Amino acid sequence: MIRCLGLFVVLALAGLILSCNNESNFDSQFRHSDKSASPESLALFAKLEMLSRKGSMLGHQDAVAYGIGWEGSDFRSDINDVCGDFPAVFGWDLGHIGDSINIDGVSFERMLYWASIVHQKGGINTYSWHARNMHTGASSWDLNTNIPDLLPGGEKHEVFLQKLDLLAEFFNALTDSEGKLIPVIFRPYHEMNGHWFWWGTKSCTADEYKNLFRFTVDYFREKKQMHQLVYSYSTDVYETAAEYLEFYPGDDYVDILGVDDYKGIKSRETLDKTINCLSIISKLASEKNKLYTLSETGFETLSDSLWFSEVLLPVIATSKLQTKPLWVLLWRNARPDHFYAPYPGHTSVPDFITFKNHPLTLFLNDIH
């Protein structure tokens, strides 16, 4: 009974007011990686676990920052325009932290505002970081780097710390109406098993990557005393569990396992590749008592008007997964030749509404 009441407090913080009697079968198998996690972060983690038992949330990158034919509205999204509901998960990026706008032209100040509204409405905020190359000052795609230089004793260590301090300042500015820190998911150094980023396979060994990831988490937890973050590790596609875990920094540093897939998800003919990836990660998540997601995905320009019901939905609904992915996050609607979610007038809108109405898919109104 004491354990149940303790869990009730955490869930109440998350906005899930549940009675012990109604949730008598709830038995948490997951553990937050941060032993000093804030009550708000624990509440978010508990909420995520509860939602993982209901279905898969839909996410969208920069969902309310801009869309096709509009930009900078108060709280608008292409997804809401076409189906009357917002995504449940809102993706943001911290690339170019320290500037006034991020890598995708989104104001950091407005990002803080929008993220607070998302939290107020019961949604989930998740942050990636397309970090600039700290040797050259160029983009994430500049491979001219040396990872050990960023760590203690390295010649670029102070530059790295300055960037981490800017991230800490941003996360600590995310507060609710009562001044409490808003818990969010942080997904740094993604797609590391690809070769395109400076933290990827052409510039970074597996051990160097692990040290980079661990130092980042330790710096936030120990030096900055930040305990509101939930950490996600997300690779590009893979074929085996060994490939997925090659860069894995360890269970004490990761709460959510993820995979970014723009390859197998493209068509019905290649869908087995996506299902294989998710089957592997689903099994690993179960073994490690972690949650897991399809952390980035989508079919650019949606030229297949039935993509949502005949490609994405079968991935979520397949019986080959031990559990469903916690969410699937579509990439951003940047312009008419680079978008991943439907917008008013697009041929995929009717199919997207069918997808939205499926009992396994969760939108904002389904989770608050």
Image (cartoon, helix red, strand yellow):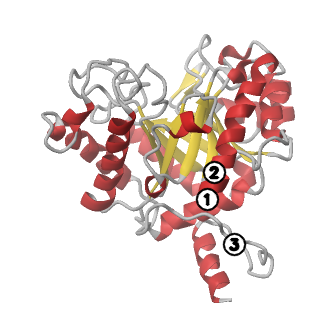
Q: Is residue 63 above or below residue 336?
A: below
**In front of the other: label 2 or label 3?**
2
Q: Is residue 316 above or below residue 219?
A: above
Distance, label 1 to label 3, CA atoms, is: 24 Å
- Quadrant in which the C terminus appears: bottom right
The kind of secondary structure element at disc 2 is helix
Instruction: Please give the label number shown on residue 285.
Output: 2
Quarter location, residue 70: top right
Label 1 vs 3, first from the N-terminus:
3
Q: Residue at x 31, y 32 (%)?
A: 100
Q: Which residue is mark 3?
A: 17
Residue 220 visible, this orientation = yes
Q: Residues within 10 Å of mark 3 (few under 14, many from 20)?
A: few
Give amino acid for label 3: Ile
Give amino acid for label 1: Asn
Instruction: Please give the label number shown on residue 289.
Output: 1
Asked if residue 132 lies left or right of residue 289, the reply is left
Residue 367 in the image, given as x and y percentages of width and height? 70, 55
Asked if residue 22 lies left or right of residue 52, the reply is right
Distance, label 2 to label 3, CA atoms, is: 27 Å
Distance, label 2 to label 1, CA atoms, is: 6 Å
Q: Residue at x 48, y 28 (%)?
A: 193
Residue 270 in the image, given as x and y percentages of width and height? 76, 19
